[in-house]
Image (cartoon, helix red, strand yellow):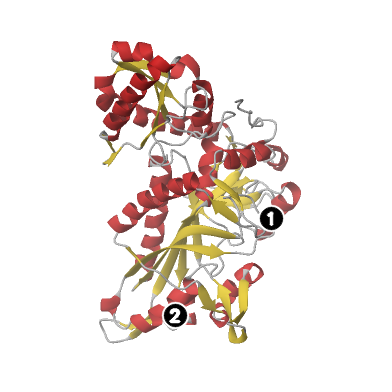
Amino acid sequence: MSFPKLPSRSENFAEWYNQLVLRAELADYAPVRGCMVIRPYGWALWENIQRALDKRFKATGHQNAAFPLLIPLSFFEKEKEHVEGFAPELAVVTHGGGKKLEEPLAVRPTSETIIGYMWSKWIRSYRDLPQLLNQWANVVRWELRTKLFLRTLEFYWQEGHTAHATRAEAEEETLRMLRVYEDFAVNEAAIPVVPGRKSESEKFAGAVTTYTIEAMMGDKRALQAATSHFLGQNFAKAFEIRYLDQNNQLQYVWTTSWGLSTRFIGAIIMVHGDDQGLRLPPRLAPIQVVVVPIWKSGDDEARILEAARNVRDRIASIVYREQPIRVHLDDRDNVTPGFKFNDWELRGVPVRVELGPRDLAAGTVTLARRDKPGKEGKQTVDMDALPEVLPRLLDDIHEGLYQQARAFLEANLHEPKTYEELKAVVRDGWALAWWCGSADCEARIKADTTATNRCIPLEQPEGQGTCIVCGRPAQVKAIFARAY
């Protein structure tokens, strides 16, 4: 059985991505336009993302809850910016049970409105604050142009929602959760990100301030990997969410919301993948280690398979980052070892354990790293050394993937000095440039280059400069790039 090659990333990045998602069995197209089916391997990756994030959310005091999928359409008309922002994307139910509904229902695009309504019933006193909630859910946004994981009509995410007594507490929460996302991206997904603030034109509909972590994909486009929104009192006033303070005075609460979705799987694919397929970060990979037995004759098969099962069981007992290593034994007898090697490389398993007759005789196994091709990534170790070697190897692979991605980001983040230089840079990279804050200058860049203002990084240089577009004084530098 032959193993067809993927398209080259450098020649056709979009087709490489689409074929990889399908052939690695992460997802497939659904019969409804713009929707996807997430297959078990892709869902296992999402479950590991959930587990890593959920642990962080609970450590910061948040609790999980569940709110309805269907929301009265009138709720979206209570907050002006919110309804204007989401109106083009709403899916609306007008009939149910064979009858026309008295009030149309929106299929959840996000939950600020329904949660705001419930908080108006639950919050009465300062003793009811803060409210720290998170929801794991699916949402629907009527996208016109879709791409598996990156932009689909229906997708899965978590959405955090909090209510606070003071503005300072809510703003602190907004930035705290941004840093939680940054920590997750770096320490679980091995993805370097730039935390920053969105411009007025790019912020979430209904937010006072939106923060983002932006990641550079393998084709040098930007991806908004997660966002955190300070909503001020916009939704509190729209839904009359008020509490009696310690002086017995009625006050409006201050709210936040923040989210990360299955588009992050797209980020993992595009940041780390290569021409052979996925390269999954070990801490999120559905399978961290695959054992591939190798035999040449039927006489070897039984004893090699028995030894391979023992190796699998031994690896499954090794604890890595507080959990047993996720290991799989590939005991298929209808394909060659070479096919198996290529198959698991395509699926991005971080470590392959090869066990053949010579290994068995010597009491060793051969370890092959997915992040380092050929002989460079191989080492032979004693079976008894696996409990010591494998956790260290998985950490080394994580660090290697992160450093490669960071070097790529740094090499392709440029600081142009003139507007003509900026236009050249954003054709194949990111531009970090002084910006006066004007929506007109921002719009001109977008019109001339299709690049958008990705964020105003939280880390800023001292002093001030001149806007790269209009030449007026500028207080901040912003990142401009083409994006997904």
What residue does disc 2 label?
117
Nearer the N terminus, badge 2 or badge 1? 2
Q: Quadrant of the N terminus?
A: top right
Location of residue 297 (image quadrant): top left
Q: Tell me where residue 365 appears, x and y as whole percent.
A: 34, 18
Q: Residue at x 64, y 28 (%)?
A: 4
Amino acid type, label 1: Arg
Q: Tell me where residue 310 appears, x and y as whole percent.
A: 29, 27
Mark 1, secondary structure of its residue: loop
Between 210 and 262, the one lying in front of the other is 262
Amino acid type, label 2: Tyr
Q: Would you say 461 lies left or right of 21 here?
A: left
Mark 2, secondary structure of its residue: helix
Q: Is residue 478 visible?
A: no
Q: Nearer the viewer, mark 2 or mark 1?
A: 1
Between 32 and 181, the one lying in front of the other is 32
Number of numbered discs on residues: 2
What residue does disc 1 label?
145
Counting other residues with Cα less than 10 Å from the Cα at mark 2, is it few (<14), some (14-19), or many (20 or more)?
some
Q: Is residue 154 above or below residue 131?
A: above
Q: Tell me where residue 53 appears, x and y as whole percent.
A: 37, 52
Q: Would you say 163 lies left or right of 449 here?
A: left
Q: CA distance from mark 2 to mark 1?
A: 32 Å
Q: Residue at x 42, y 39 (%)?
A: 285
Q: Is residue 400 visible?
A: yes
Q: Is residue 338 above or below residue 330?
A: above
Q: Residue at x 41, y 79 (%)?
A: 118
